[in-house]
Image: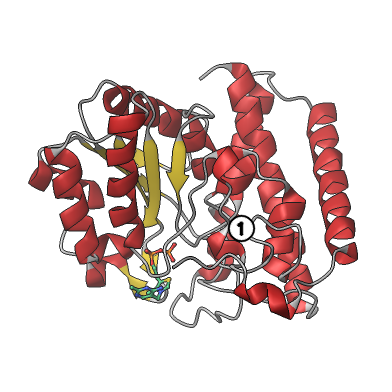
């Protein structure tokens, strides 16, 4: 991973973390619907994975976090307008943050239920294979989601057809309040790849270089027509499942917040090798703040979607 990419992953992670914190603040103040599943702790992983893609590739994502969209290039104001139900969002506020669809940036959205994205990825993979060879689709999902039946049927068919699909599991150890060990038959989600005869790789999701390298290999394999790879990144969810989650099932939540954050560790490593300087850290943070302030001002000034627009964009 070259220095430019590393620096971009850092910048995007900082922007995503700060933007999300602002959204949480606004939601708590009643200025924004509180329907957000915070991605804090998983941004480095998400942005490093996306750094291994080309702009022409596609992603389907899960519900956790907004770093995917920022990394692909969706504007902050469009993401915020979607959350606020306002004109200017990628779907003009009709779907909220969980349904940002930004096709020009290769973001095909999320399904209405967990794990629907597996099936969607197969459809996308078949279309890419026939009509746009050389492009890949990545589906980002959680460990809990890997227990859906759609996982099996999709990985089976994607393998049979050698589709250019990459299955990227962010294992944060929980599905809402249920520990992975209590709900999942295997120790590593990646172990399930053996059932389909495809590579299954476990990677430290707090290490952006490791994530990038694993993704690079999977992308190469998919582009070459050799079929899917199942990647499992071990990550830490720093906050609750959703904003109102009191985390009574997680007595060590406060300690995790202060000891398991990959972002300061990433920053330190970049400072050590001279890719970052203290002045650059400050500049990146100031720049993020400016972008966030601009997006908030744009969305505050934007109108709510008119009620009659509810009947537009319907297909039969
Ligand atoms: C089919 C389906 N079942 C249940 C839910 C409710 N639900 C939303 S998020 C979630 C937990 C998902 O856990 P995981 O896949 O590990 O992702 P994480 O939230 O940990 O990032 C559940 C059960 C849903 N949206 N769809």
Picture quadrant of residue 19: bottom right
Q: Residue at x 67, y 52 (%)?
A: 17
Q: Position of residue 126 (x, y in %)?
A: 27, 40
Picture quadrant of residue 168: top left
At mark 1, the secondary structure is: helix
Location of mark 1 (residue): 258
Most foreground residue, 186 or 102? 102
Q: Residue at x 35, y 39 (%)?
A: 203
Question: Visible in this render: residue 7?
Answer: yes
Q: Position of residue 102 (x, y in %)?
A: 58, 48
User: Few, some or many C-alpha atoms within 10 Å of disc 1 (few <14, some 14-19, many ≥20)?
Assistant: few
Q: Position of residue 145 (x, y in %)?
A: 32, 63
Q: Residue at x 77, y 69 (%)?
A: 25
Relative to residue 203, is residue 260 drawn left or right? right
Question: Visible in this render: residue 187?
Answer: no
Assign the C terminus to one quadrant of the image: bottom left
Relative to residue 241, is residue 125 drawn left or right? left
Picture quadrant of residue 182: bottom left
Q: Residue at x 27, y 47 (%)?
A: 122
Query: Compared to 250, does 279 lie above or below?
Result: above
Query: Compared to 16, does 131 lie above or below?
Result: above
Ligand 1 falls in which quarter? bottom left
């Amino acid at each position: 991973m070259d220095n430019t990419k590393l620096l971009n992953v850092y910048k995007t992670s900082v922007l995503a973390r700060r933007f999300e914190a602002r959204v949480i603040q606004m939601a708590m103040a009643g200025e924004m619907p509180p329907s957000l599943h915070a991605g804090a702790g998983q941004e480095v992983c998400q942005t490093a994975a996306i750094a291994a893609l080309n702009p022409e590739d596609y992603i389907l994502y899960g519900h956790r976090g907004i770093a995917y969209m920022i990394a692909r290039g969706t504007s902050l104001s469009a993401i915020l307008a979607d959350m606020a139900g306002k004109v200017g969002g990628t779907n003009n506020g009709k779907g909220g943050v969980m349904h940002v669809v930004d096709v020009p940036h290769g973001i095909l959205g999320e399904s209405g239920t967990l794990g629907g994205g597996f099936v969607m990825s197969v459809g996308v993979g078949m279309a890419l294979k026939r009509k746009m060879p050389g492009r890949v689709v990545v589906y980002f999902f959680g460990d809990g989601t890997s227990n859906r039946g759609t996982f099996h049927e999709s990985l089976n068919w994607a393998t049979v057809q050698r589709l250019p699909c990459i299955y990227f599991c962010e294992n944060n150890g929980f599905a809402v309040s249920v520990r992975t060990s209590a709900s999942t038959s295997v120790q590593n989600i990646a172990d399930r790849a053996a059932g389909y005869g495809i590579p299954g790789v476990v990677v430290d999701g707090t290490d952006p270089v490791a994530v990038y390298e694993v993704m690079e290999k999977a992308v190469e394999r998919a582009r070459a027509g050799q079929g899917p790879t199942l990647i499992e990144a071990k990550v830490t969810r720093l906050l609750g499942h959703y904003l109102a989650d009191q985390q009574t099932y997680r007595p060590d939540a406060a300690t995790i917040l202060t000891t398991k954050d990959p972002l300061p560790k990433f920053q330190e490593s970049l400072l050590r090798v001279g890719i970052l300087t203290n002045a650059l850290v400050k500049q990146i943070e100031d720049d993020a703040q400016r972008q966030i302030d601009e997006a908030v001002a744009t969305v505050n000034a934007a109108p709510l979607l008119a009620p009659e627009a509810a009947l537009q964009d319907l297909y039969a």
